[in-house]
Amino acid sequence: MNSLTDIRRPVALTEEVYARLFDQMMTHGIAPGTKLSVDALARTLNVSQTPIREALARLEAQGLVVKVHLVGYRVAERLEHGRLDQIYEMRLLTEPHLAALAARNIGEKERAELSALWQNMDTGAAFRTPEDYTRFSRLDEEFHGSIAAASGNKVIAEALSALHVHVHLFRMSQPLTAISDAIVEHRRIAAALAAADPDAAAMAMRDHILNSQRRFAQE
């Protein structure tokens, strides 16, 4: 498991800091509600405050951290079930439509990238640890984000970008075997996009979202 220890490589430093903090939040190594000190994080990771602030700004945009006036940052609290239901309502209203648009508009390059993303999920199907799940969550976020981008509707794509992270935080409380079901559902979506079938893509996305919501209801 990645820990909050010294980061030594200078390449893409902000991305490294972001990835380290993201991993810790997704695995609850940094618990919801925890106060975050820019100065303390800079000392712990042995970097300047600049990449810390840039990483925290990105996490804030995703809704993973909250900036509190005159206090600093804290990790966002885990969403209430009612709020999660509202997220799923928005997803059902938008993502099937985006999948249909993507099936019409997607190019060969984007289609190949989506296929590669799904295959990367599938090859890592034996998810056993929170760290495995963090890797899956990144692939899942990229998969859904790529479909939204391929739809051509930037407004909806941007509105959805922060929602998947909170879904993943909820899924951390589920058995990791639930991931295998999501992978099968992703395969249906990818196949519909590969076939350039808007109706099938919309239906596969709708089924995936409903199944994901049902899995949470079983907690």
Image (cartoon, helix red, strand yellow):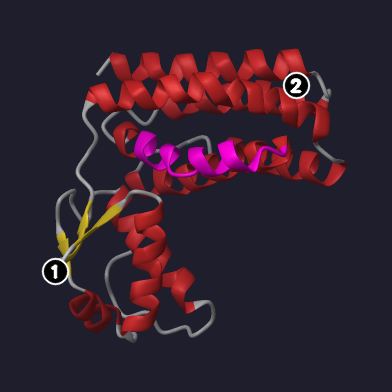
Mark 1 belongs to which amino acid? Leu
Q: Quadrant of residue 179?
A: top left
- Compared across the picture, whether 15 is left or right of 148 comes to left
State whether residue 174 appears in this view. yes
State whether residue 123 appears in this view. no
What residue is drawn where x is 28% and y is 55%? 65
What residue is drawn where x is 74% and y is 31%? 102
Q: Quadrant of residue 18?
A: bottom left
| Count of numbered labels shown in the rendering | 2
Q: Main secondary structure of the magenta part?
A: helix
Q: Nearer the viewer, residue 69 or 116?
A: 69
The span shown in magenta is: 152-168
Residue 140 among magenta residues: no
Circle 1 residue: 70
Residue 57: horizontal and vertical position, in percent? 37, 64
| Vertical position of residue 182 compared to residue 4: above or below | above
* Callout 2 crowding tier (Cα within 10 Å): few <14, some 14–19, many ≥20: many
Secondary structure of the residue carrying tag 1 is loop
Q: Nearer the viewer, residue 160 or 142?
A: 160
| Vertical position of residue 181 compared to residue 22: above or below | above
| Vertical position of residue 50 compared to residue 114: above or below | below
Residue 12: horizontal and vertical position, in percent? 53, 77
Q: Quadrant of the C terminus?
A: top left
Q: Quadrant of residue 143?
A: top right
Residue 163: horizontal and vertical position, in percent? 42, 38
What residue is drawn where x is 67% and y is 42%? 149
- Asked whether the beta carbons under mark 2 and mark 1 sit within 8 Å of each other, the answer is no
Mark 2 belongs to which amino acid? Ala
Circle 2 residue: 192
What residue is drawn where x is 47% and y is 83%? 9
